[in-house]
Structure formats: C-alpha cells, structure tokens
Image (cartoon, rainbow, N blue to C red):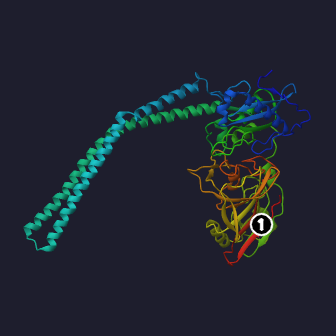
C-alpha cells in the first residue's frame, strides 16, 4: 500500500463526491477536502518537535483522490521544507528533491557559498578598509589644499582690485600685479594636477581590490544562473493527459517568462504530481495556513487559501490540463447578464449601482464589464468613462463621466480628496469598539469611530493581493464605526480617506487593522456567495453647477 495514500479515519459516508475538480485560485473547499484537512491538522498538532517552526507559519494542502482499488483517500503536502527537509513519510515527496547533501545542487550551491565567503573575506580585510580609508583621506586632504589656495587667490585678487581702485598704478606695478595673477592661476593648475595624481594613485590601489571582488561577483552570478537553470530543468511536471514539461518550458509560455524562486515547491504541484505519478484520480483539493500570520500578509491560522498566482498559476494551468475542472467563480459571476440600476444622471455624469461580480472596466476575464453593459443599455450614449473604480466583488455607487471634460473635472475632485464616500460592510466576527475614538465629518454630520493607517503596496509575487509595508507602501487611511452586531458578525461603516486597491479589505483583515475580515473575502478571509462590501454613499460639490450632490444606495445584504 502506498504510504502517502491515507484512508479517512473519520466517516465520509454520505458526503458528496465533487463532479469537477477544484478551481484552485478561488474556491470553497468541498466537504471531503475539509475532512481531509482536519485530519492533517490533527496530525500536525501531534508533532511537538515542529511547534516552533510552524508557529512562524506554513501552508499545508490536501488532495482527495481515488486509487486503483476505487477507494477514496487523500494525500497531504506542505510548502517548501519542514524541519530542514522536503521529505517526510506522511506527506508526498517534492517534485524534485534538490536537498541531497552529496547531490549536484548542494555541491554547486556550496561552491557559490565559498565565493560568497571569499567576497566577504576581502570586504572585511584590513587591506580593503585601509585602501578605502586612504582614498577618503587623500581626497579630503587634496580638496582642502585646493580650497586653501583658492581662498588665498581670492584674497590676493581683492587686494589687487583695491589697489587699482584707490590709485593710479605705474606700468611696472600693473605688470607685477598681472604677473602675480597669472602665476597664481598657473600654480592652481599645478596643484590640481598634483592632487589628481595622488587621488588617482589611491583609487588605483582600491580599484585593484574592487576588481577582484567584482570578478568574484560575476563568477557567482554566472554559477547561480547556471545552477538555477539546471534546477528549473529538473522540475518536470505531469498533467492529466500524461504530458511533461519543466519549469522553463512552462514559464516561457506565461507573461513572467522566468520562474520565480521556489516555483514548484508549493503544495498543489506536489500533490498533483504525486497523484499522476501513482495513478490516482484527483477529486478535490484545499490548502490551509498553519501558524501566525506574516507581518505584511494576511494569513489566519487554519483558514483555507487559494493557490498563489506568481509561482503556481502557470504550473497548475499546465498540470490541470486533462482534468474536468470547475469554472472560475470569478468568470461565472462576471458572465451573468444584469441590468445596471441608474441612481443619478445629468448632462455631465451618471451614477450607477454596480452589481457584485462585475468589473468596473474591461479586464482579463472574457465577460461583460460595467461600461459594456451600460453602453448596451444606453445605445444613444457614445462616451462613458468611470471616474473611479470598485473591486469586481464590491457593489455600490460608482460615477461614470459622459465626456472627457467631465471626467477631468471629477478626477480633480477625487485627486484632491473633495469626494467623500461611505461603505457598509459585514465583518466575520464580533468587533471591539476602538480603543481611542476620533471625530470626523461625513455629509455635514459629525461621526465618532476608529482610525486605521496601514500603508499598502501590491504583492508582486501574488497579485492582486496587497501587502502592508511601512517602508515602501503608499499611505492608506480609513475611518470606521460600528453599526450593529448580530450573532458572530458585525456591520460597520467605512469612510476611506484614500483610495488604495483593496484598502478596506486589508484594513479589515490585517492584524494591525480590525483583525476581522469582511464576510466573503476570498483573498483575505473565507469564500462565501459574495463579498459583503458595498459603496453606499458618495458626497461632493458638483464641479459644473456648484450644487451639493449626495447619492445613496442601500446595500443588498
């Protein structure tokens, strides 16, 4: 019996077997996957020797499969390494184990490490420090020498100018003054030439050492690139049609072209590879986080998460070929034909209630977006351009300009924070009142609530997710207040002062924010039928009429 194939210890009698395999980038786990994940969680909890490592956080995955005896069981995997190795008997092996101490990769990695040590040794040597210090000292001394002589020349020039202005000089005296000036100018050139030679000599001494360092760095870069390509070529994946492709071949067909570090070491590729290799039929899968959340990302202990985009999407697109996979929930939602409700219209712009699951502008999905639907609905209207955007899964008020002039005028209001917005959201948990309340205004009324200031930037390795980054993130500011709490859920109002991507979603879910994700947030929380976030109200002064505009749209939840 295959040691990585696990029979369910819990009863799965009566649980439905999915007709299609899980779409890995947006899913609600099948019941079979949840049972399998719970058994893996129990297994992990028993291993106290992993406690400290896992407390820092790691992704685990399960794949429900059917074996050649028609038995249903599951496979388990972890991302990367665990306890310094990629191989543990309970979990499926890596697609390619490059960690063998005597193997090609480790031997050549050691060679690169030796170069690193050599570079460090040179950079920490007395000779290197001495050469740098000597150059700095010579440069400072020569600069001071030149400046002293220039100062002397300036004093001498002032003296000559004063003599000429106060008296009529004889021809001999004037000749002496001219000769003095010419000598000083020539002497400055000689001083500059002399000091340049001194600095050049000091630079030459330092350059000899730095050339040695740079040569080692070029050698390291060449060895690293060669070793990386070797590694990519040895990560060979199967798909359900029995076809093979390595990482280089897979990523050359994607927009990224070059595989990122760690590609192929995540749970999903490991699980599918083992299933195909051993003749198992994949049924459903799920991945869950175990341990603390990273500071920048949002990961909650025990919660399920989709496969990452940068590392896994190109690989899984290949590996899933030949499987009957669920359609993307995003595409299914976006493909629904809906009528757009118009909330306000004048000669300059339209305000509409964007439904959830509709893109604000055309995107990668082959489905109608908000503008396309509006143009079908309003065939007489030739120019429609959204002034701002809402996430695909966020519903609510959005402004559409009828001309470029209107677009620019409304954009000016947004850019200068003269547009005030309120969102309503339902959070997945009981929310405590803010420790320190602040006062703010909305639509002429005073409000009191909490303040969240967490700078955001895109997660370049897993778009469209956003990260909290205090060094490189853009400022993101949100006021909030509690509306009501029912059961284990809390309704809140959000008043964003900035308009960053996923701002309210991250500010809700992040541990330094409200630490309570919005219901239905499949990126930062858990999937449900919809994201419970709605742009309810918008308020501003009309840029053409000067009248106060207040547009309100009740949420559908």
Is residue 219 shown left or right of residue 356? left
Judged from this view, the residue extending furthest toward the bottom is 545
- Tell which of 427 and 388 is nearer to you: 427
Q: Residue at x 81, y 33 (%)?
A: 36
Mark 1: give few (<14), some (14-19) or many (20+) Cα within 10 Å: many
The image shows residue 367, relative to residue 544, as above or below, that is above
Q: Is residue 327 above or below residue 218?
A: below
Image quadrant in which the C terminus is located: bottom right
Tally of numbered discs: 1
Residue 337 appears left or right of 359: right
In this view, the residue farthest toward the right is 14
Question: Which secondary structure lies at badge 1?
Answer: strand
When asked about the image quadrant of residue 184, the answer is bottom left
Q: Would residue 461 be seen by someone viewing this image from the given angle?
A: yes
- Say which residue label 1 marks: 352
Place of residue 479 in the rendered image (x, y in percent of width and height, measured from the top left): 67, 60
The x and y percentages for residue 283 are: 83, 35
Residue drawn where x is 84% and y is 36% of the image = 32
Quarter of the image for residue 92 reads: top right
Query: Measuring 62% from the left and 40% from the top, which residue is drawn there?
Result: 260
The percent position of residue 375, horizontal first and vertical second, equals: 78, 66
Which is nearer the eye, 525 or 347?
Answer: 525
Instruction: Using the image, determine if residue 336 lies above or below residue 459.
Output: below
Whether residue 240 is visible, yes or no, is no
Image coordinates of residue 523 in percent, x first then y, are 72, 48
Look at the image and tell me in which quarter the N terminus lies.
top right
Residue occupying image coordinates x 73% and y 49%: 516
Would residue 186 appear left or right of 214 to someone viewing this image?
Answer: left
């Amino acid at each position: 019996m295959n040691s990585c194939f696990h029979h369910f210890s819990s009863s799965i009698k009566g649980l439905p077997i999915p007709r299609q395999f899980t779409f890995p980038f947006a899913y609600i786990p099948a019941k079979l996957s949840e049972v399998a994940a719970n058994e893996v969680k129990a297994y992990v909890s028993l291993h106290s020797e992993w406690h400290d490592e896992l407390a820092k956080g790691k992704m685990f995955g399960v794949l429900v499969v059917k074996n050649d005896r028609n038995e249903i069981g599951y496979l388990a995997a972890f991302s990367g390494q665990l306890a310094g190795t990629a191989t543990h008997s309970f979990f499926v092996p890596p697609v390619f184990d490059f960690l063998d101490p005597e193997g090609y990769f480790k031997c050549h990695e050691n060679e690169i490490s030796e170069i690193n040590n050599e570079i460090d040794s040179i950079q920490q040597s007395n000779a290197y420090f001495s050469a740098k210090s000597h150059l700095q000292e010579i440069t400072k001394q020569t600069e001071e020498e030149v400046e002293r002589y220039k100062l002397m020349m300036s004093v001498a020039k002032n003296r000559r100018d004063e003599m000429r202005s106060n008296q009529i000089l004889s021809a001999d005296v004037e000749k002496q003054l001219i000769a003095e000036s010419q000598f000083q100018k020539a002497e400055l050139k000689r001083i500059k030439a002399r000091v340049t030679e001194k600095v050049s000599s000091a630079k030459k001494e330092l350059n000899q050492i730095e050339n040695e360092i740079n040569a080692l760095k070029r050698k390291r870069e060449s060895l690293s690139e060669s070793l990386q390509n070797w590694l990519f070529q040895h990560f060979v994946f199967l798909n359900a049609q029995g076809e093979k492709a390595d990482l280089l071949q897979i990523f050359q067909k994607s927009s990224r072209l070059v595989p990122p570090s760690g590609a192929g070491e995540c749970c999903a590729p490991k699980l599918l590879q083992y299933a195909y290799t051993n003749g198992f039929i994949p049924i459903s899968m799920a991945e869950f986080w175990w341990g603390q959340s990273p500071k920048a990302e949002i990961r909650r202990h025990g919660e399920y998460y989709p496969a990452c985009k940068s590392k896994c999407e190109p690989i899984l697109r290949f590996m899933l070929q030949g499987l009957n996979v669920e359609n993307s929930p995003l595409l299914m939602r976006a493909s629904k034909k809906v009528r757009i409700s118009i909330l306000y219209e004048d000669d300059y712009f339209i305000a509409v209630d964007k439904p959830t699951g509709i893109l604000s502008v055309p995107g990668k999905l082959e489905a109608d977006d908000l503008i396309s639907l509006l143009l079908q609905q309003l065939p007489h209207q030739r120019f429609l351009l959204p002034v701002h955007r809402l996430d695909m899964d966020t519903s609510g008020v959005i402004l559409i300009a009828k001309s470029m002039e209107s677009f620019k005028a409304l954009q000016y209001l947004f850019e200068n924070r003269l547009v005030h917005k309120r969102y309503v959201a339902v959070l997945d948990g009981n929310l405590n009142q803010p420790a320190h309340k602040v006062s703010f205004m909305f639509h002429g009324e005073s409000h009191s609530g909490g303040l969240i200031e967490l700078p955001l930037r895109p997660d370049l390795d897993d778009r469209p997710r956003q990260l909290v980054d205090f060094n490189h993130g853009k400022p993101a500011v949100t006021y909030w207040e509690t509306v009501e709490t029912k059961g284990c859920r809390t309704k809140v109002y959000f008043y964003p002062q900035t308009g960053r991507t996923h701002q309210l979603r991250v500010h809700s879910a992040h541990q330094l924010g409200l630490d309570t994700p919005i219901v239905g947030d499949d990126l930062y929380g858990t999937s449900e039928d919809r994201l419970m976030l709605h742009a309810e109200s918008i308020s501003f002064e009309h840029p053409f009429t000067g009248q106060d505009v207040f547009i309100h749209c009740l949420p559908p939840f």
